[in-house]
Image: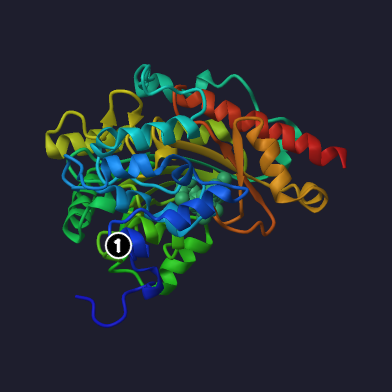
Amino acid sequence: MLFGKKPGYDPDYDLKLEESLAKNEYPEEKLAAARAAEHTSLCAQVCTPEVWAKYKDIVSSGPAKWTLARAINTGVMYPDSFVGCHAGDRESYDDFRDFFYPVIEKYHTGFSMEKGSPLQGAPSERMDPSRITVDLCDSAKEKIASTRIRVARNLSMFPLNPGGSRESREEVANLMAKVYARIPLDSDLAGEFYLHTKISDTERQALIDDHFLFRGKDRMQAASGYHEHWPHGRGVYLNKAKTFINWVNEGDHLRIISMEMGGDVKAVFERLSAGAKAIEEGVKAITGVDEVFMMHPKFGAVTCCPSNIGTGMRGSVHIMVPKLIETIGFEAIDRLCRERNCQARGTTGEHSEVLDRIDVSNWRRIGLPEYELVEDMIRCANFLAGEEDKI
Ligand code: ADP
Ligand code: MG
């Protein structure tokens, strides 16, 4: 039982609905200002008065009874967000289609909701490391501090977390504890599951500092409802070598992660593939449910944020390019990455500063098998290494 202060929590990060949204009124001023700004979030671009009027009084047909006001809160509160909207259950994507479909198509350029592009082939084929046909060049290898590939997954028997409750989050964590207990002790994936309610703030912070754990305390995530009922149901699974990691209930129910120091991308991908399979089989065995991961017939994996749907995969390297950072800066590096279907993030993840290393990852997540997305990332890392060497 926890008394007093919740671990690692600050009430500044409670879920607050923006003023007009709290009254279920169209946030005219905020969205108009967001649209006039140089950068406009996808939420602000798509949520016109017509779209709002169409959906303001309906709730999703799924377990969350999601509303458009909840869905767009992040984008309305934070004009600097990139996507700015979230789903509360699988049904939200179709029930609010005139909102979510254009958001999806704007993020995943080239993807059409009408045509759709479900995941093609078995995971063992899509995530087969031997299909990766490009390698990191020597110069890139020298500059890479670490490699991490993750897939976002949600369990089909629960609402997505923004639309969930303390109980649904705890049920997810209880189920996952059983799944982890089934992993054979002699397997490389074997390890321990730590709940946020059981570890100290110091232990949690150490895991965050080592890039093994989500930070919490993110204003945009708070606005989407990710931090509600903190710390209940949150946890992290770590194998002994801390190379196979699962985040439980950060936002998505699961982030299945493979990571290690250095640039052995294929080894990281191979472990991810084996780990994702073990998790899927474990949930299946315990629940008896056939399709355990929440899937959509048009795009594949369903995630809280439209940016992650599809494969849910983000493969990244932490690359040291100090001269490039010094001469052209982060924004220009990000632009170069985006021209190559990739993106740049700061040293401690999304919405963070660049300290010494840049996180370079695939931008596309949909319509392509996972191994091709890894190839995007490898090519971009090679390109950046080359640019660094020219200076
Ligand atoms: P995600 O897309 O998985 O949500 P975030 O941008 O939120 O990723 O970052 C999560 C954590 O993973 C951060 O601590 C970040 O520094 C770490 N991380 C991302 N890529 C790498 C990498 N290649 N090596 C080590 N840590 C990484
Ligand atoms: Mg994140």
Residue 51 falls in which quadrant of the image?
A: top left
The residue furthest bottom is 4
**Residue 321: percent from left, percent from top:** 75, 47
Is residue 187 visible to us here? no
The residue closer to the viewer here, 22 or 371, is: 22
**Disc 1 on helix, strand or loop?**
helix
Query: Residue 261 placed where, x, y %?
Result: 58, 47
In this picture, residue 17 sits left or right of residue 342: left
Residue 50 as seen in the image, left or right of residue 391:
left
**Dot 1 crowding, Cα within 10 Å, few <14, some 14–19, many 20+:** some
Q: Observer-nearest residue: 14 or 24?
A: 24
Residue in the image at 26% along x and 47% along y: 56
Three-letter code, disc 1 = Ala
Image side of residue 125 versus residue 140, left or right: left
Q: Residue furthest right?
A: 391
Q: Would you name the residue on which mark 1 appears?
A: 22
- Total numbered labels placed on residues in the image: 1
Quarter containing the N terminus? bottom left
Residue 286 image-quadrant placement? top left
Q: Residue at x 33, y 49 (%)?
A: 71
Name the one closer to the observer, 117 or 237.
Answer: 117
Residue labelled 1 has its Cβ within 8 Å of some atom of ligand 2: no
